[in-house]
Image: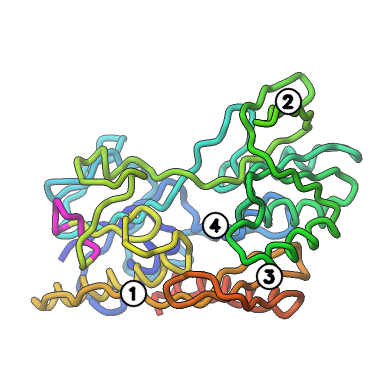
């Protein structure tokens, strides 16, 4: 059986490694746009220069897995077509291309590897008193602002979002904002309408009419899906994610699985904690198919919480019900930071070993 995995993030790496372990005779090819596995949940550390978050792809994939660097143009009719003209045939394909960003002109997107590295370089060149503006009030924005503020206390850091920490309960929400302020982050509850580039930085126009100057403006909103599924003629939902059946297969082609952020799985939250289990499921399903057995339907695992780090020494862990709705309870401080670190390591370790 020939399997092509498109994308080597948490979901794709987990799927390839686990399949190689469970169905050793399967011929597996992994296609990725870069030669590294990127710990996407740690990109804020890449931005601040506190930690490298990429590892050679060959070091995280099991022996026997063929991997190539390339951009996929289309998937369908039993083959994957790359933009360089290569065509790779498959019995089954796994789409694991994740999510992407659509930044405003004049901003640097920190939710992707290339943007995070650009931000690191530009941040390191800022002089004392420089102003860094982070756009996005979700986890990516919060973690980026906190990491930069803690690492570069000589800079002014502001965080702009319509509802900064709005995905947490009131008490946790207020605690997150308090910790950000303790790090020196200015919180602005507003939305960005436009960003103009200037000779010395950017000019940020807010929906309220307020105008701010900034030496470096970082876009920390994850708001899109690569259009590979749509470009391949597969059915997608309004956000561009591939519509799948109960087995995480495209409703248009049973030979194509879609997992992770690029898959429209009812009730699933876009995160590495969702992607890795889906990668594990896809590998199990393919292993069963390789033995002539039907796969079992996918079951969305229970959620237990959502977490956000605030620098190197603090975090907030918001507990949730199994359906991901919020509970009142939360955990903060150093203990939460340690738990968040362990969870991140578990996500990476699982994806890179196929456990």
Picture quadrant of residue 258: bottom left
Q: Helix, strand or loop at disc 1?
A: helix
Bounds of the magenta span? 248-255
N-terminal-most mark, 4 or 1: 1
Q: In percent of the image, x 73 and y 51: which residue is there?
A: 145
Alpha carbons under labels 3 and 4: distance apart: 19 Å
Give x and y (percent) for residue 256: 20, 56
Residue 347's place in the image compared with 88, above or below, is: below
Which of 59 and 232 lies nearest the eye of the viewer? 232
Q: In percent of the image, x 28 and y 38: which residue is there?
A: 73
**Numbered label attached to residue 316:** 3
N-terminal-most mark, 2 or 1: 1
Which numbered disc, 3 or 4, marks the residue closer to the eye?
3
**Numbered label attached to residue 40:** 4
Residue 198's place in the image compared with 114, above or below, is: above
Q: Helix, strand or loop at disc 2?
A: strand
Instruction: Give the total number of marks visible in the rendering.
Output: 4
Alpha carbons under labels 1 and 3: distance apart: 32 Å
Give x and y (percent) for residue 126: 82, 37
Task: Classify residue 30 as left or right of residue 100.
Answer: left
Task: Classify residue 321 as left or right of residue 122.
Answer: left
């Amino acid at each position: 059986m020939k399997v092509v995995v498109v994308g080597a993030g948490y979901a794709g790496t987990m799927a390839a490694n686990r399949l190689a372990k469970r169905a050793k005779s399967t011929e597996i090819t992994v296609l990725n746009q870069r030669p590294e596995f990127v710990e996407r949940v740690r990109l804020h550390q890449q931005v601040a220069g506190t930690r490298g978050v990429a590892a050679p792809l060959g070091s995280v994939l099991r022996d026997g897995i063929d991997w190539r660097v390339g951009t996929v143009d289309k998937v369908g009719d039993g083959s994957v077509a790359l933009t360089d003209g290569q065509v790779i045939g498959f019995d089954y394909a796994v789409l694991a291309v994740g999510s992407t960003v659509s930044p405003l002109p004049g901003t640097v997107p920190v939710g992707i590897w290339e943007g995070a590295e650009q931000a690191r370089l530009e941040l390191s060149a800022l002089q004392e008193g420089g102003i860094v503006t982070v756009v996005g009030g979700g986890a990516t924005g919060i973690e980026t602002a906190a990491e930069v503020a803690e690492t570069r206390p000589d800079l002014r850091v502001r965080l702009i979002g319509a509802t900064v920490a709005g995905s947490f309960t009131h008490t946790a929400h207020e605690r997150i904002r308090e910790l950000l302020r303790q790090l020196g982050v200015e919180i602005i509850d507003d939305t960005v309408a436009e960003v103009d580039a200037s000779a010395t930085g950017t000019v940020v126009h807010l929906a309220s009419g307020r105008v701010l100057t900034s030496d470096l403006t970082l876009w920390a909103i994850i708001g899109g899906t690569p259009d590979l599924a749509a470009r391949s003629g597969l059915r997608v939902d309004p956000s561009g994610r591939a519509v799948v059946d109960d087995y995480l297969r495209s409703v248009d082609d049973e030979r194509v699985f879609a997992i992770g952020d690029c898959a429209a799985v009812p009730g699933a939250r876009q995160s590495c904690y969702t992607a890795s289990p889906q990668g594990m499921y896809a590998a199990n399903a393919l292993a069963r198919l390789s033995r002539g057995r039907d796969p079992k339907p996918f079951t969305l695992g229970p959620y237990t919480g959502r977490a956000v780090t605030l620098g190197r020494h603090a975090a907030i862990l918001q507990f949730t019900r199994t359906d991901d709705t919020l509970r009142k309870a939360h955990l903060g401080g150093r203990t939460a930071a340690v738990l968040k670190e362990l969870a991140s390591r578990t996500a990476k370790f699982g994806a890179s070993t196929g456990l």
